[in-house]
Amino acid sequence: MRHFEAVRSHIGSQHELRHNDPYLISFDLELAQDRYQGIYLAELEDESGRRYLRISTPIGPLAGTDPNRCLRFNWQQRTGFLAVADLDGSPYLHLCENRPYEFLDTAELQRVVRELGTLGDQLEQIIATGGDSL
């Protein structure tokens, strides 16, 4: 996978796309127990022109979330980090991962999508129930 169109082609062959914009696609990842997690893939470019694939999933509203816990979570994670982005005009926590294309193949893409989707669903459930585990 060397570019976003290869990602779009692969993901589109595996999942029904909800969004299909030039540099953003999304789909619902089916998880266990009839649960689904929204997954977003977007292309990013750094200052030197190197391109990355961002894989992200929304997990809950930012309001009421302890920023120290978010930073502690980021420190402990091997894959994925918490970030804030707007969702329908409100600040929302997202679990994200940025991968350079040159190290991305279909197996790695599927592994990262599955890992972020599963962890994102678990975090979303914790936040929704007011849990203290984050």
Image: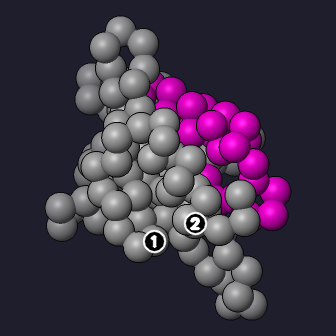
The reply to whether callout 1 and callout 2 are in contact (CB within 8 Å) is yes
Q: Residues within 10 Å of mark 1 (few under 14, many from 20)?
A: few
Q: Residue reaching furthest right?
A: 103
Whether residue 26 is situated above or below residue 53 in the rendered picture? above
Whether residue 36 is situated above or below residue 95 in the rendered picture? above
* Label 1 SS: loop
Instruction: Give amino acid for label 1.
Output: Tyr
97 sits to left or right of 36: right
The numbered dot on residue 23 is 1
* Label 2 SS: helix
119 sits to left or right of 123: right
Magenta-drawn segment: 96-122
The numbered dot on residue 82 is none
Q: Label 2 belongs to which residue?
A: 4
Disc 1/disc 2 C-alpha distance (Å): 7 Å
**Which of marks 2 and 1 precedes in the sequence?**
2
64 falls in the magenta region: no
- Estimate the x, y position of residue 107 in percent, counting from the top left: 72, 37
- Estimate the x, y position of residue 32 in percent, counting from the top left: 42, 13
